[in-house]
């Protein structure tokens, strides 16, 4: 929410709003989570769909905001937390019956979204091209306005963040770090790996003491069960980011440390 420019109030609750592909059964309880990303829908298509959802479902309490690709945001003014909502990528190919929200309003929004999205021109065009339609929203991951300490005040260091993911950029903005945009950064296997590496190196040369380069590709490939692409993503991180930063810093002749790690595992069975 912070990353896409929403000025959250203290009593606002932000929820992640995925555009997903559910199977075609009439009753939502019988549907299956076909694709948590609606076939990696484009940002331009998604913006039209979220606009349509907002026009139909927004109220004095509720506002929908478009983000990147399938990742969007619902702001619930004076909303509730601890809603026991399920991340859609955790239930790929599963029937959604046992994972639907117990909160009546959230459930109703998800159910009503299908009528808005099913025959929207964007989805009609996607189906004609053989692409998966974004035929439902899926709400999850609620949270309140972040209270993140200023990075420089906390550490005495200047820091920067490079990421294609709104969540990570939002943390950087909240911590008053430099948030660097890289052309062609997508959050997936087609991202601009070398551009991120070069941007990270430049950020250090330009005076930052710490740079966090975030790469979503291995995680996305893991969720999608794409083992070859996951291996490829790790190889590209090695060759296009770690190598670029390491060799660039060696040429500067300064001491440095590089830490390479995941934020969590996404195993492919």
Image (cartoon, grey):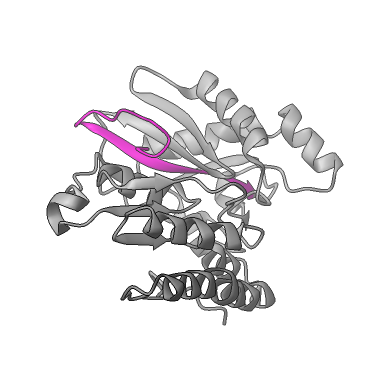
Q: Is residue 204 above or below residue 117?
A: below
Q: Is residue 179 above or below residue 117?
A: below
Q: Is residue 233 magenta?
A: no
Q: x%, y% of residue 90?
A: 49, 63
Which quarter of the figure is the N terminus placed in? top left
Q: Nearer the viewer, residue 249 or 263?
A: 249
Q: Nearer the viewer, residue 107 or 238?
A: 238
- Residue 102 visible (yes or no): no
Q: Is residue 20 magenta?
A: yes
Q: Nearer the viewer, residue 155 or 244?
A: 244
Q: Is residue 193 left or right of residue 207?
A: right
Q: Nearer the viewer, residue 216 or 245?
A: 245
Question: Which span of residues is magenta-colored?
Answer: 1-21
- Residue 252 visible (yes or no): yes
Q: x%, y% of residue 19?
A: 57, 43
Q: Residue drawn at (54%, 49%), measured in percent from left and top?
A: 182
Residue 231, image quadrant: bottom right
Q: x%, y% of residue 170?
A: 35, 45
Which quarter of the figure is the C terminus placed in? bottom right
Q: x%, y% of residue 33?
A: 60, 56
Q: Residue drawn at (39%, 39%), measured in percent from left and top?
A: 3
Q: Residue drawn at (49%, 55%), measured in percent from left and top?
A: 199
* Number of numbered discs on residues: 0
Residue 224, image quadrant: bottom right
Q: Is residue 212 above or below residue 116?
A: below
Q: Residue drawn at (78%, 40%), measured in percent from left and top?
A: 126
Q: Is residue 264 left or right of residue 197?
A: left
């Amino acid at each position: 929410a912070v990353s896409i420019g929403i000025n959250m109030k203290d009593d606002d609750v932000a929820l992640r709003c995925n555009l997903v592909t559910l199977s075609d059964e009439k009753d939502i309880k019988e549907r299956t989570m076909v694709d948590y990303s609606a076939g990696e829908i484009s940002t331009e298509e998604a913006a039209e769909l979220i606009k349509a959802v907002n026009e139909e479902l927004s109220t004095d309490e509720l506002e929908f905001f478009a983000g990147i690709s399938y990742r969007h945001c619902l702001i619930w003014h004076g909303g509730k937390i601890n809603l026991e909502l399920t991340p859609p990528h955790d239930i790929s190919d599963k029937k959604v019956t046992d994972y639907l929200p117990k909160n009546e309003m959230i459930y109703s929004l998800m159910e009503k979204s299908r009528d808005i999205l099913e025959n929207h021109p964007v989805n009609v065009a996607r189906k004609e091209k053989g692409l998966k339609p974004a035929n439902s929203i899926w709400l999850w991951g609620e949270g309140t306005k972040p209270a993140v300490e200023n990075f420089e005040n906390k550490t005495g260091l200047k820091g920067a963040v490079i990421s294609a993911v709104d969540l990570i950029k939002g943390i950087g903005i909240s911590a008053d770090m430099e948030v660097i945009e890289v052309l062609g950064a997508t959050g997936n296997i087609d991202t601009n790996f070398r551009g991120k590496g070069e941007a990270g190196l430049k950020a250090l040369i330009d005076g930052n003491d710490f740079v966090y380069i975030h790469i979503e590709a291995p995680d996305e490939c893991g969720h999608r069960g794409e083992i070859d692409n996951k291996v490829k993503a790790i190889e590209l991180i090695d060759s296009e980011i770690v190598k670029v930063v390491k060799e660039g810093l060696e040429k500067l002749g300064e001491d440095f440390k590089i830490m390479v790690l995941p934020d969590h595992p996404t195993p492919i069975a």
